[in-house]
Image (tube, rainbow, N blue to C red):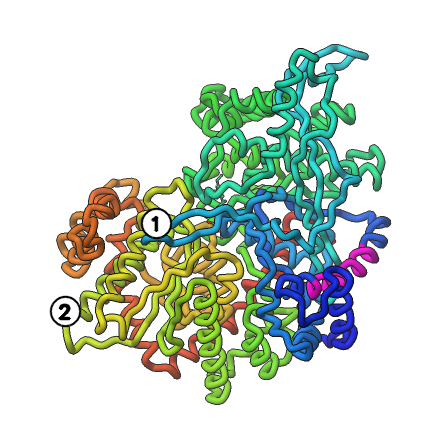
Amino acid sequence: MPTTKFDKESIKTSILGKLQRYNGRTLADATQQQIYYAVASTVRDQIMQKWVAYREQDKNYQGKRLYYLSVEFLTGRSAYCNMLNLCSSSAYREALEELGLDIKKVLWEEPEPGLGNGGLGRLAACFLDSLSSLSMPAVGCTIRYEYGLFRQRLIEGQQVEMPDNWLENGNVWEVPAPEDTCEVHFGGWVEERHEDGRMKFIHHDYRTVEAVPYDMPVAGYDCETVNSLRMWRARSPKTLDFKSFNSGEYMKAMQEQELAAVISKVLYPEDNHYEGKELRLKQHYFFTSATLQYALKDFKRRFGNQFHLLPEKMTIHINDTHPGLAIPELMRLLIDEEGLGWDEASWIVQRTIAYTNHTVMSEALEKWPEQMMQNLVPRIYMILQEINRRVCADLAEKYQNGSDPRIARQAVIAYGMVHMANLCVAMSYSVNGVSQLHGEILKKDTFHDYYQVMPEKFSAITNGITHRRWLMSCNPQLTDLICDAIGDQWVREPEELKALLPYRDDAAFRAAFAEVKRQNKAYFSDVLFKRQGMRVDPDFMFDVQAKRLHEYKRQLLNALHILVLYNRIMDDPNFTMQPRVFIFGAKASPAYYMAKQIIRLILAISRLIDRSPRAKKMLKVVFLENYDVSGAEALIPAADLSEQLSTAGKEASGTGNMKFMMNGALTIGTMDGANIEIHNAVGPDNIYIFGMRTDTVRDLQQTGGYSPMHVYETNAELRRALTQIIDGTLMPENPAALQDIYHNLLFSDPYFVLKDFGSYSMAQRRTEQDYRDQEKWVKMAISNTAASGFFSSDRTIWEYNDRIWRIR
Ligand code: 26W
């Protein structure tokens, strides 16, 4: 490992100095929080030093810059990863130890920014870490939500949401950049005027919201690059905009002023489910407009009015369609503010914007009512109309038929709705899926019509995760073990982890590998105790499903299988099994009724098992409350088995699957998303694949030939488990409480839970047998870690750069 650049003595001195200056305290008198703040501030000092130098050099940068726009950046805590990337983590460890402090305890004080729901937001955070570590000039752009994703509590067997006031005690990592404050305009109306031989568009009576940027430094690993995550906060203008309001509307103006700040108040908790809330559209336009104004300002500083250079000097990458208004906004800025013509502006936009799709779930595709768009952003709406007119005209010409049904399917505006995905596909130069299968589905299904007319835009780039956070930072013992065995080349070239493969056959290495896993289990148990006063036995097998709660992810398959195991134990006094704890981590969207019911079911199963002295010797169900990045960092290194159960064709990629395999967990999963690529990387002997394949699912869906009742009638164990959902076994006090789950499975089962149950259950039998053979199991686990290098987001970022961005 690269040696530390900051010695422990100076670290100690600066920590004590900060406590004295900030708090007027000695170490002995300081609270844990004050200590955290002092420690983090010393790390920040180091980053600031680099940041200043990097920015200085960046002033003369003439190359391309990437703007990565995402409505979510789920960064997780920063302190430890920053130490790691500054190559000071061991110096800090030692320094804190010598001060009598436990580094883990101190860093536990850092509030976690929960500025994301799940996969999409966490991916953005991994990408930023890789971009900096690979020294690519990039800016992450998002909203500085005052409240992140809700905190989940489990009360009386149900999820309860609490506000996440993460900024309560300040945020050490952010630096405001008031000089880049800009205005975003909403509402009003647009005057069209002929002037100097061209059309001019003048926006009147708009409401102004100020966008104030806060930057978080993102230091690359052992390099000089420090990129920024720019988070925009909404603020009311300090003075009333008297030009926009006539005096009679003073009170109304005051009220609207109040409303401005609401825009960056809270992150929407929906994942893979779209609701057409106006405030959400405001959020999207707010941060997109602010970002593009800033990007254009930077471009003009570097290249003046040479707008034809724009595609060469910046890429605006939009993370799903949420920042898709970047397209009309860039048109607006170029036409209305810079005086370009439509054709010129559109030429630029179509070479500057790149789009990644992250889901094929139809209920997640964004569609905004035309009327809402027109009221909220009238000029943007006009541009969308013109884009739509031209897109449809082009298609009519291509199809040689103005009423070809494909035109309506591909239109940007149709049946009163603005279709964001169509806008993004039509106007960006690149459209990519996030795994190979997902890329194929986009071409075959989701964007089939577009693929026929512009195939060159489409590609697939398999997601990745930063091995710096998801191995080196969360699993330091395994990191040390790997380095002892194969050196540290893999740190820079993660695919070199494959050098571990021969160590499968080294008994001493296997023992050490198993010992690390055991310690991680014990550590997780401590964390669980700290978080919710529970413990788990590290001698149990850890079987983990951690991800957002969604029917397509099929936590139900797992839950029903646990019930079946419970019945086997209770029915047969001679039945034994390898003791196993099933650990769930999952937040349900507050308005997603079925997802919340599934949480109730899992908690009821947990209680049922705990009531039986015999069952609980072999079986336990733990629901990790408030699953977040920190929870994942403790849980994933402790997992033996990783549950990746989505209905084939539904999970675009998955990234949790990659984190588990990297930390030596085996996967039980369907041939879906990146599971397929994990299967290819580790080989069929090191993974448990079950269930229908995509084509079978599609056939069944299309023919409507699936009958869950038929499965119910033919599988007695499953029938019994299903009956227990409603017969009072699970909910003695309220047997009808979970009946909707029962009915949904029996009479609809849109995600084929019952259909795949038999196959899943057989695969679980194989995990049981293999786990009993510890030698075999550990060999398989090592193979997984050894094959995980491909899933580093460094590889993903190289691919984006190679095929889409071409930054350097
Ligand atoms: C507008 C409501 C909404 C909110 C979030 C719709 C869709 C989303 C996200 C696109 C959902 C999401 O996080 N998708 C996940 O993206 C990951 C990163 O690419 C993939 O690994 C997951 O498979 C995919 O579900």
Disc 1 Cβ-to-ligand 1 distance below 8 Å? no
Q: Are marks 2 and 1 in contact (CB under 8 Å)?
A: no
Residue 377 x, y percent position in the rendering: 61, 24
Neighbourhood count class around disc 2 (C-alpha, 10 Å): few under 14, some 14–19, many 20 upward: few
Q: Residue at x 65, y 58 (%)?
A: 129
In the rendered structure, does residue 40 fall within the stretch colored magenta?
A: yes
Badge 2 amino acid: Asp
Q: Taking 311 as reference, is 386 left or right? A: left
Query: Which range is magenta?
Result: 38-54
Up the image or down, 118 lies above or below 401; here it is below
Residue 625 shows which numbered tag?
none
Depth check, mark 2 against mark 1: the one in front is 2
Three-letter residue code for mark 1? Asp
Residue 551 at x, y percent in the picture? 35, 48
- Residue drawn at x 61%, y 37% is 428
Q: Is residue 81 magenta?
A: no
The total of numbered circles placed on residues is: 2
* Mark 1 neighbour class, 10 Å CA radius: few under 14, some 14 to 19, many 20 or more: few
Q: Can you see residue 759?
A: no
Question: Which of 253 and 285 lies nearest the eye of the viewer?
Answer: 253
Residue at disc 2, CB closer than 8 Å to ligand 1: no
Residue 682 as seen in the image, left or right of residue 496: left
Residue topped by disc 1: 695
The quadrant the N terminus occupies is: bottom right
As drawn, 275 above or below 170: above
According to the picture, the residue beneath numbered tag 2 turns out to be: 571
